[in-house]
Image: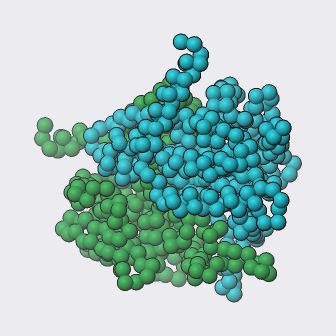
Chain colours: A green, B cyan
């Protein structure tokens, strides 16, 4: 078999796996409304009032997907992710003038909140002697900035938030978003920071009710989730600038795995991060270069997302120029 | 083998399983500090200023435990639980004069917040024209009540919050709490609303690094978590009033399973709830009676926890009387 034939056979196999994944997935709730919100958001940013050209739009995915083990789900497999990366990156993209579709796991960190405590409502506020709500001193600036920046981004039509929980919801929404961004060509970006499960239990072969524990140890067999990155890049959004993430706990294999992902899924950039140091530094792996960016340790409250997004926006601009000329 | 011998053999087997669970568990971080906070809390409530007898103390557990699949954890199995039940129940216990140790899964619903949206900070607040933070109209009463009631409970020494994430942390903390409450005898209550995993991967046999997805489908073998309810009831806190929960998705087996749990673990009450109707009604299964309580549908914002905790406190009072005379 020559290599074109081999590619075609693999492609066919992948297409069949993807069809089987979507066919077996429970239908997305409220999908008509999601589609309406998406298309309105894209339209608004394609011809923003008072600006002579459309804005760039980035889809930021954030948080982990769940894999239900039962149809009426009590137990599930989850991927560890607080959503801090996606939330902080969203702040940076909006600040740089991008419109952001924030596809996030319900309950994870929200844009403009990544520097606040988890239980911000109870931790950051207090009742004054005059029985008025007030922000506790150490948080007063951060809370005010969070609320006002978030309000400005939503009111300015620069931020659309779409929640997901399961891997089924995530991939259906991602496909829908890629369809809504098709006309933007190279002006669209996918920044895929969500921690997506590699394994799943097909809906049809899933237990309907809670698995009973009386019958001894639990044996689970999980299928591999088809590699949607490749399809996103080649079919769903062939002109968009695509950035994926590689998280490993073993630094020895990290860059090699990131490089493999870059080639295998034809990404424009892969952000390689190691579990223990991911808030300090990340390495952006691209075809011709690898660049490590660091948090500015001399500036209090500085994060690694600021230099990371700066670098990626620079490469995105170069990509647009290259596509247009 | 006669039945005493059989019980002894089973007991020995269970003890061995529990030893193996705790021996293999990663040690609890900061355990000395947790123990200090616990004993101070118990002491404060054993002789509250201005009151002539000690308060009743309830340990409310809330949210789901995770089961890590890797030591440097990227993936885990989780139990579905928003923590609403535990949070709302805590409000009711404090209101009734109990001191509450709230053992909760990080990131789940907090006491006094169960009627607020998940992203309360961004959803409930806005910046006014004078660029001041203010609560959005529909939430103003609820937010104010949440912050002031929470503040009062913490300041009054009636609420101690201890977070957990994994099943290892949860069970180690639960054991520590039961030790700290031992002297309270029947004045201590365990209200075990957390969704605790039935299965786990022993720490020693766990993969150190992220499991690689390249090698095809994933096969997982999980051990059963030893039945700690029984040990809590018979050894850790033999005089405390113990309430456990049974959640099923299949109403046909629910009451039968709750009844089995009541007998098997010698609980004083088992709260039976079905996944789909759990916010509307629950059935309290006790040795001589089964009582179903409902949310008051005619009162806006009423929850099922109010009548549930009323009933349980009534039974706890009867239990104390019975123990004392």
Nearer to me, B170 or A217: B170
- Please tell me which residue lies in front, B280 or B102: B102
Which image quarter is the C terminus of chain B in? top right
Q: Report whether B275 appears left or right of A173.
A: right
Q: Quarter of the image holding residue B317?
A: top right
Which residue, as the protein is rendered here, is positioned at the far left? A2
Count of labels in the image: 0
- Up the image or down, A14 lies above or below A174; here it is above
Residue lying at 42% horizontally and 30% vertically, measured from the top left: A219
Residue B8 in sight:
yes
Residue A203 position (above or below residue A94): above
Residue A181: give x, y in percent of width and height: 44, 61
Q: Which residue is found at the position 74% from the left and 32% from the top?
A: B285
B95 or B325: nearer the viewer? B325
Asked whether A42 or A105 is in front, the reply is A105
Q: Residue at x 35, y 34 (%)?
A: B219
Taking the spot 57% from the left edge, 13% from the top edge, the residue there is B2
Q: Position of residue A249 (x, y in %)?
A: 31, 56
> Residue A133: x and y, percent?
73, 76
Give left or right: position of B177 versus B320: left
Residue at the far top: name it. B1
Residue B252 shows in the view: no
Q: Which residue is most to the bottom?
A: B130
Q: Give the side of residue A182 with respect to residue B147, left or right.
A: left
Q: Position of residue B90 (x, y in %)?
A: 71, 54
């Amino acid at each position: 078999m020559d290599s074109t034939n081999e590619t075609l056979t693999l492609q066919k196999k992948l297409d069949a796996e993807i069809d089987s994944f979507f066919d077996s997935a429970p239908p997305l709730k409220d999908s008509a409304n999601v589609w309406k919100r998406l298309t309105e958001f894209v339209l608004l940013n394609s011809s923003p009032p008072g600006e002579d050209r459309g804005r760039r739009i980035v889809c930021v995915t954030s948080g982990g997907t769940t894999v239900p083990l039962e149809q009426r789900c009590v137990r599930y497999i989850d991927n560890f992710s607080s959503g801090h990366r996606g939330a902080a990156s969203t702040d940076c993209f909006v600040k740089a003038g991008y419109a952001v579709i924030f596809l996030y796991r319900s309950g994870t960190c929200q844009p403009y909140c990544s520097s606040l405590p988890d239980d911000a409502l109870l931790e950051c506020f207090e009742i004054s002697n005059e029985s008025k709500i007030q922000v506790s001193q150490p948080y007063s600036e951060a809370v005010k900035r969070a609320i006002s920046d978030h309000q400005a981004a939503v009111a300015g039509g620069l931020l659309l938030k779409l929640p997901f929980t399961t891997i089924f919801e995530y991939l259906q929404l991602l496909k829908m978003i890629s369809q809504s961004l098709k006309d933007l060509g190279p002006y669209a970006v996918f920044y895929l920071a969500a921690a997506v499960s590699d394994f799943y239990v097909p809906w049809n072969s899933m237990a309907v009710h809670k698995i009973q524990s009386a019958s001894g140890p639990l044996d689970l067999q999980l299928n591999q989730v088809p590699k949607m990155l490749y399809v996103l890049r080649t079919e769903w959004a062939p002109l968009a600038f695509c950035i994926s993430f590689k998280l490993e706990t073993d630094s020895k294999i990290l860059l090699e795995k990131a490089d493999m992902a870059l080639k295998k899924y034809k990404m424009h950039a892969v952000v390689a991060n190691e579990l223990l140091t991911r808030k300090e530094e990340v390495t952006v792996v691209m075809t011709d270069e690898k660049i490590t960016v660091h948090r500015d340790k001399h500036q209090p409250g500085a994060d690694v997302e600021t230099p990371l997004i700066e670098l990626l926006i620079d490469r995105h601009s170069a990509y647009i120029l290259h596509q247009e000329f």
